[in-house]
Amino acid sequence: MHSKSLKKYIRTIIFMMVSVAIHMAACPEAYAQNAMAREHQPAKRLITQDKLHQQISYLCDTLCAGRATGEKGGGIAGLWLKREFERIGLMKMGKSYALPVYLGNGKYGRNIVGMLPGSKDFRKDKYVVIGAHYDHIGTLDGKIYPGADANASGTVAMLSIAEMLSAYRNLGKSHDSNVIFVAFDAKEHNMAGSKALWNMIENGSLKDPISGETITKSKITMMVNIDQIGCTSAPLKSGRKDYIIMLGNESLKPIKRDMLRICNRMFAIDMEYDYTYYGSKNFTQMFYRLSDQRVFIDNGIPSVLFTSGITMNTNKTYDTPETIDLEILRKRIFLIYHWVDKML
């Protein structure tokens, strides 16, 4: 390259670098958003509205017949979840993903449980549990209760987060904590599924699939539950469709309590959120204990619940896939995913 051309080339490069530096100084948050968004884009591309609709529709199909615990339809839903856990690459917690839930009178259900290991190089003995119940009412008087929002939506959200974290890990990213994903059965039977999992933790029968060591209560740092996350018909005070409720934020360490707001802003999701159940202290306390996080709360584990609230469709025959707002569900999944990623 001639000397004159080389000088011109160098001047151009210097000008570009200075321009970028000035722009970054003026808009540092925008650059941070773009960089972080690019890092997670391969994982997020896996979650499409069509895919969410197909998964929810399968769980609401007549084949699953309302997913009642101990019935054929519930068993079919459980088999599908086992295949999904295997496809995603989660590790079995023993010989099978299916762990028994005894209901009494010779009747059983099945929790579907799998683990995503943390860092490959610096593995730590810490675990975060992420769950959602997949069972529902079943078929009553010949009428199927599909349970699209309650809780096919939460189950599919949990699967999506598992898939994204697994993909993120396969790209060479890692976390300090191991993540145990649980599709709980028997929530409609006084939360027997989550109680059964906790009994395994207490009696020492839940083992790490890599080390074989017992997963004790002291090793579980957080529980995240997702229950009814797909509808937009019970908005917060502003009336916006794109909202989410997170209960239990105060159970987290103070340094972590602002993480939802940070993720919401830094990843440009811009969703309305509330840490209460529609501003009521009494309802917040009640709903915080109405799902599978309860046994973890009672045993001193920091626990949160993500939900979009109870609606007029809850526990009705018309809680169908058509009532799910797939665009908003996808946004909620992304916000929870980013939050979990920063909490691990």
Image (tube, helix red, strand yellow):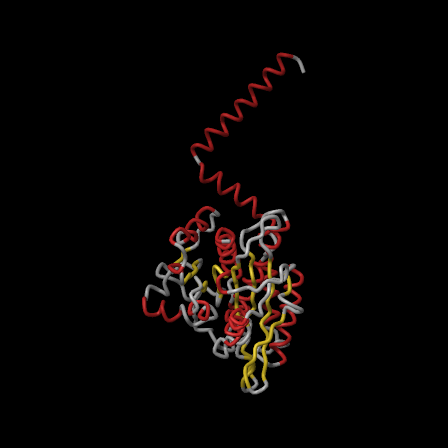
Viewer-proximal residue, 66 or 164? 164
Q: Can you give x and y, in whole percent of width and height, for residue 93 in the image? A: 62, 66
Relative side of 50 to 301, left or right: right
Relative side of 115 to 338, left or right: right
Q: Can you give x and y, in whole percent of width and height, for residue 196 in the image? A: 53, 74
Report the label total: 0
Relative side of 288 to 69, left or right: left
Q: Can you give x and y, in whole percent of width and height, for residue 83 in the image? A: 66, 66
> In the orientation shown, which residue stands out farthest toward the top?
3
Residue at (59%, 86%) from the top-left corner?
A: 106
Q: Can you give x and y, in whole percent of width and height, for residue 55 in the image? A: 60, 65
Quadrant where the N terminus lies?
Answer: top right
Viewer-proximal residue, 222 or 319? 222
Residue at (58%, 54%) from the top-left corner?
A: 118
Q: Is residue 49 above or below residue 22?
A: below
* Quarter residue 56 falls in: bottom right
Residue at (65%, 72%) from the top-left corner?
A: 79
Viewer-proximal residue, 165 or 274? 165
Residue at (60%, 64%) from the top-left corner?
A: 114
Relative side of 159 to 302, left or right: right
